[in-house]
Image (cartoon, grey):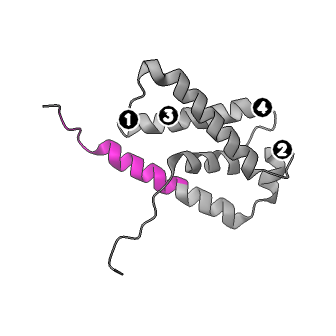
Amino acid sequence: MASENTTKKIDPLYTIFEQHLFNFQDPNADRGTFVEGIVKEYVAHLRSIGLAVPVEWQEHIFEELFFQVNTMLVKKIYGCHTIDEFTAKATTAQKRRAKARYQKLTRATRKLASKPKKEAA
């Protein structure tokens, strides 16, 4: 029981979201632009690990991801009027944890991307 691998799974979408949130730099960016950047990075992550989004489903998937990230943003910054206000209130420990999770995700992504692809039989 104690020898089992207890490593937590990383939620790539939330990890990317947190990274963008805690490293927010452009106070002039609107919410849509902010959310779109997260969605684009997440889709790029999926592609880098070999998952493709079929063209006929792309628009629907992007819309769903946009909705999910927007909901995450609303819940995360509840009580704050802007992302800047939220990040100003965030503790150093919160920012460090988010950065560490993001770095772990990027290492795992690079590791997966460097594995040789299996050829279709």
Residue in the picture at 40% in, 37% down:
48
- Residue closest to the far top: 56
Label 3, on which residue?
43
Q: Is residue 110 part of the magenta span, yes or no? A: yes
* Few, some or many residues within 10 Å of mark 1 (<14, 14–19, 20+): few
Instruction: Check disc 4 and give the amino acid type.
Output: Asp
Question: Mark 1 near mark 3, Cβ–Cβ under 8 Å?
Answer: no
Q: Residues within 10 Å of mark 4 (few under 14, many from 20)?
A: few
Question: Secondary structure under badge 4?
Answer: loop
Marks 3/2: CA distance? 26 Å
> In this figure, which residue is indicated by the disc labeled 1?
51
Do the numbered discs 2 and 4 sit on residues whose CB atoms are within 8 Å? no
Which numbered circle lies on residue 26?
none
Query: Mark 2 or mark 1, which is nearer the start of the sequence?
Result: 1
Considering only order in the chain, which callout, 3 or 4, is on the residue closer to the N terminus? 4
Q: Amino acid at mark 3?
A: Val
Tally the numbered discs: 4
Q: Is residue 45 left or right of residue 81?
A: left
Q: How many neighbours does mark 2 have within 10 angstroms: few (below 14), some (14-19), or many (20 or more)? A: few
Residue at 64% across, 40% down: 69
Amino acid type of disc 1? Leu
Determine whether label 1 and label 2 are within 8 Å by CB: no
Which residues, given as a range, are shown in magenta? Answer: 102-119
Q: Nearer the viewer, mark 4 or mark 1?
A: 1
Magenta span: chief secondary structure: helix
Q: CA distance from mark 1 to mark 2?
A: 34 Å
Compare residues 31 and 91 and report the one nearer the observer.
Answer: 31
Asked whether the beta carbons under mark 4 and mark 1 sit within 8 Å of each other, the answer is no
